Image (cartoon, rainbow, N blue to C red):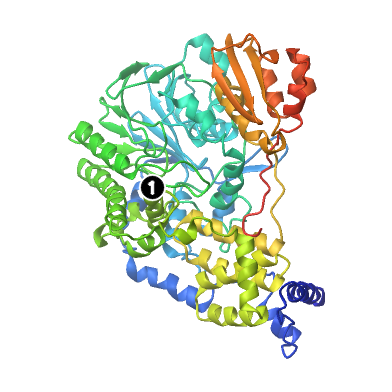
Amino acid sequence: MKRMLSLIGIATLACSLLFGCATQLDTSQSDQQMDTLFNAEQKGATDITAQLNQSIYDMLDFENQQELEFASRGLICAPESLELQDEDGKIIWSQDAYAFLENQEAPDTVNPSLWRNTQLNHIYGLFEVIEGIYQVRGYDMSNITFIKGDTGWIVFDPLMSVECAQAALELVNEQLGEYPIMGVIISHSHVDHFGGIKGIISEEEVAERHIPIIAPEGFEEYASSENVYAGTAMGRRAAYQYGTLLEADEQGAMGIGIGMGQSKGTISYISPTDTISATGEVRVIDGVTFEFQLTPGTEAPVEMNTWLPDQNALWLAENCTGTLHNLYTLRGAQVRDGNAWALYIMEALALYGDHVQVVFQSHNWPHWGNEVVQEYMENTAAVYKFIHDQTLFYINQGYTANEIADMIQLPEDLGQVWYTRQYYGTLKHNVKAVYQKYMGWYDANPIHLDALAPSEYAQKLVEYLGDTDKVLEMAQADFEKGEYQWVAEITNALVYADPDNLAARYLCADALEQLGYQAESGPWRNAYLTAALELRQTGAPTANPLGGSRELQLKMATNLMLEYLGIRLNSDALPDLNAKINLTVTDQDEQYLITLRSGILLYQKDVQDEDADATWRLPKAAIFFLLQGDAESVKELGNIEDESGILDAICQNVKVFIPGFTIIEP
């Protein structure tokens, strides 16, 4: 403790010297009092948080057991233990870690609504949806579905990790008998819906037996591109969204509304052999008829629902998931269209609503009965339509994103529905997504046109505030009153002004922790608690600079690779680099003209320049080394005519991004 106090003293003295502030610690406070106020230990729920969480029981109908019944219906087998490890013994998926959820009421440190949802996602195993349709749930973030054909299985969405998909298939084989995979249908371009494919089938088997791998048109482009341009930043931010650094316990990670979290196994990839380009297209696989409805721009840039007319069953992909989903995902992604989302759900109702008897999906559990299903789809559509329309209603009256997010509440009858609760997406950040889609970042206040950077703003704020000890004293008083959001904001400003101010770090962490305990959204809880963890540990975690799936990276189109090279190139360091390069990708039969203009990379396909400064003849694999700044490997693999040393200049200024940057501090 004395060492911590000495560090605080050093930090506050530095602040005093820098800003001329009276920042000496209050010597009237004892070490014991300081230890109580500012320390790195994880805390329990305050009385205020406990009371707020207790009030949830009065707000929602916990006697309504429909979702529990649906989450449990059709259970065939649930292994007593489910903990999967990779070859090195690292745990890549565990339901065992959540054993503390069983037969317990919500503790004060968890929103009871989120606790209930996490309990439902802890119901895992092999389930019969209806005769001939089976799901393995709780073996990854998403579900894997097996449709029985004449001779084998047609699989929907083979999970995120190879190990998880393999374990799911083994469970199916044990309980239902071994049958070959006759087809795979991938609903959309997010990795938790295709990354485990080699756990159920090999690329060689697909080729030898002509097994159809069906996906919506544009799938491969978006599967490889959506997480490339800003992929490193998304990967770092995903640790906040999915709580991958948190322990699973009453003060740590809960479920995320669409599952328990991300698996950490091997990501694989097999290219589609067939694409769906229009709603109403039909495929018959192993005697089973599938009709497809395209839903682009909803939960993913390309996505599709699937109707099984012989079973009166509708696969809703991730368009209905038993929770409010994201119009904007906290890890970062293109904003989704809430209006289109609602319209496509209503289109599905128009197409199949009269006949559908069960809907099942890639997350959470099915819903049964025509009347229940129609209400389920209509309510889900209504939520997205409400968020879209009401945000625009207030935009057109001059309100800003933060103001609208603070104003809007769901209609009471929709807000009480369990499957539209805010377990994954939230009303507040979805409202801001709609604002972003239509209005962008600017709120029309010219003060924000050229706002100060966060650290500069924080330093000026501290300079004006003067006595940081007084600020901390006031913040602590506000913490005791339960004003956790404000306390987090003001103490985080102190952290941005001086990251070594341990008292500010620890009080900020304490405030964030209480916000996490109150959150109904799993990702919000994870974000708050991960930020608190990093403030207490003083720094961001180290991270693997590569990440992602090597197999998926190898499927990147050449033009996408060139665009990513432009992103990785430090143009600021090359203001005088002006050149033209004739590029031939030898194993793809492609030609490009690369133009470097003041270090900025431009390209044109099917164009060459007789007077080019360099000629590169490269296999596609060499471009991966180019992206790593490895000039020697590029030269070994390719045929380079480059007397001006353009290749070396580029490689010397390629930045390999590492997702270990800080988030909660400068």
Tell me, yes or no, if residue 210 can be seen here: yes
Using the image as rendered, state which of residue 180 and residue 78 is in the foreground: 180
Using the image as rendered, state which of residue 9 and residue 217 is in the foreground: 9
Please provide percent x and percent y for residue 196.
Answer: 55, 31
**Horizontal side, residue 231 vs residue 340: left or right:** right
Please provide percent x and percent y for residue 244.
Answer: 60, 50
Check the picture and name the quadrant holding the N terminus: bottom right
Tell me, yes or no, if residue 509 can be seen here: no
* Residue at 29% across, 27% down: 308
Q: Is residue 135 above or below residue 115?
A: above
Using the image as rendered, state which of residue 393 and residue 134 is in the foreground: 393
Q: Residue furthest left?
A: 354
Q: Is residue 35 above or below residue 631?
A: below
Numbered circles on residues, count: 1
* Residue at 75% across, 15% down: 642
Q: Is residue 358 above or below residue 254?
A: above
Check the picture and name the quadrant holding the C terminus: bottom right
Amino acid at the residue labelled 1: Ala
